[in-house]
Image (cartoon, rainbow, N blue to C red):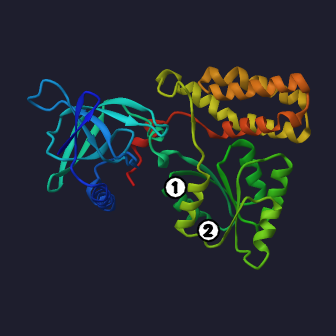
Amino acid sequence: MGEVMSGTRLVRTIRLDDELVTQILDELDAAGKAHDKDRRAQRYRYRVKGLVIQMQQPGFATPISYQVPTRDMSAQGMSFLHGGFVHPSTRCMVQLITRYGTWNNVNAVTRRCRYVQANVHEIVIHFDQEVDPAIYCPDAVQSLVLVVEDDPLMARLARFYLEKLNAAVDHAENGKIALEFVNNNTYDVILLDMIMPVMDGFEVVRVLRSKGFSGIIAAVTSLTKPGDREKCLEAGCDLYFAKPLAESDFIALLGSIRAEPLFSNFHDDLSMRPLIHEFVAELPAGLRALEQAMVDQDVATLEVLTRKFKAEGAGYGFDIITEVASKIERGLIDNARLDTVREDVQLLMKLCSQARAPLDIDSLEAKPAS
């Protein structure tokens, strides 16, 4: 162990260089399925170089502070590297660093200490109360994906890869069904086969764009002749992928489109969770109405809709939604012209698509670890 000063407090650290720490963590991840079968909750990569943890070691009157490199976390606990043995049932307090650079203090207890190599142990702790991993880990943010594909085998393969990457997947067998899905849900991306019966991908894109749909549409097609890519993009698709897609394609796709989630200020208030879920569930309908009002150039309807968002957003903890909606409303009252508020309406639609309800912890308990 090494020691550094943090303000006036002595903080102990593990004495390993960064490259070796990364190597050890990667090896633990690679062997994770063999060693961590008893961990039922979904785990997510959580790499923080110097997370502060205070341990109440036996025989010490006050907690000892350590800076530790972390490995992963779940809703129920996390693991990290430590320089020495830690007794099971040791109490501790962890300063979990969020994706936004802030931190939350979480009380926990040591469940397991496993020897890794000389002067290195992996410590597994259990939180006193469940946390939402999406606040801390980018990989825990669930993407919403619509796969529009008439080939059931291709659709099954896409679902397999996407769900491995923590995506919630809907499947539409043809373009007509896809339009019904889009009317009722807000997707981070639509994976669209361009050649299908009933309604092909080109017609789907035309209809969606004509209705003001501004979401991401990726053409996934066997059309690979010169000019086919340009044809798909000119039709209104944002991205183009030639079949068959490999796992690396899905990883790159979700990595590029995974939006920064927008959480309620009341995210950790258990009593508010059902209300926030209801609010977020109703946002897709409001988003579609906004898009349609812009297409119809309906100033009166747009003013009614933005007034509704202004009234509800902050009440459910989404202050930024209220702020942007208020700006749109003022702009319409002053000018009554859509071109003066178009950018703000697009921002409001983006915020609505990014809004996330608190994690349903109960749904994770039965999900096997990856």
Of the pair 101 and 134, the residue shown nearer to us: 101
User: In the rendered image, which residue does mark 2 sit on?
Assistant: 154
Of the pair 48 and 252, the residue shown nearer to us: 48
Outermost residue to the bottom: 225
Tell us which disc is closer to us: 1 or 2: 1
User: In the rendered image, which residue does mark 1 sit on?
Assistant: 163
Label 1: few (<14), some or many (≥20) within 10 Å? Answer: some
Q: Quadrant of residue 50?
A: top left
Relative placement, left or right, of 278 versus 330 is left
Relative placement, left or right, of 355 versus 42 is right
Q: Quadrant of residue 330?
A: top right
Q: Kindly report the distance in space between the C-alpha atoms of the residues bearing marks 1 and 2.
A: 14 Å
- Secondary structure under badge 2? helix
Q: Are marks 1 and 2 in contact (CB under 8 Å)?
A: no
From this viewpoint, is residue 200 visible?
no
Q: Position of residue 339 (x, y in %)?
A: 88, 37
Q: Is residue 186 above or below residue 27?
A: above
From this viewpoint, is residue 137 visible?
yes
In the picture, the quarter occupied by the C terminus is bottom left
Q: Amino acid at mark 2?
A: Met
Residue at horizontal 78 percent and vertical 36 percent from the top:
345
Of the pair 305 and 85, the residue shown nearer to us: 85
- Secondary structure under badge 1? helix
Q: Position of residue 113 (x, y in %)?
A: 18, 46
Q: Amino acid at mark 1?
A: Glu
Q: Position of residue 102 (x, y in %)?
A: 45, 33
Residue at horizontal 55 percent and vertical 51 percent from the top:
167
Q: Is residue 113 above or below residue 236?
A: above
Residue at horizontal 64 percent and vertical 34 percent from the top:
281
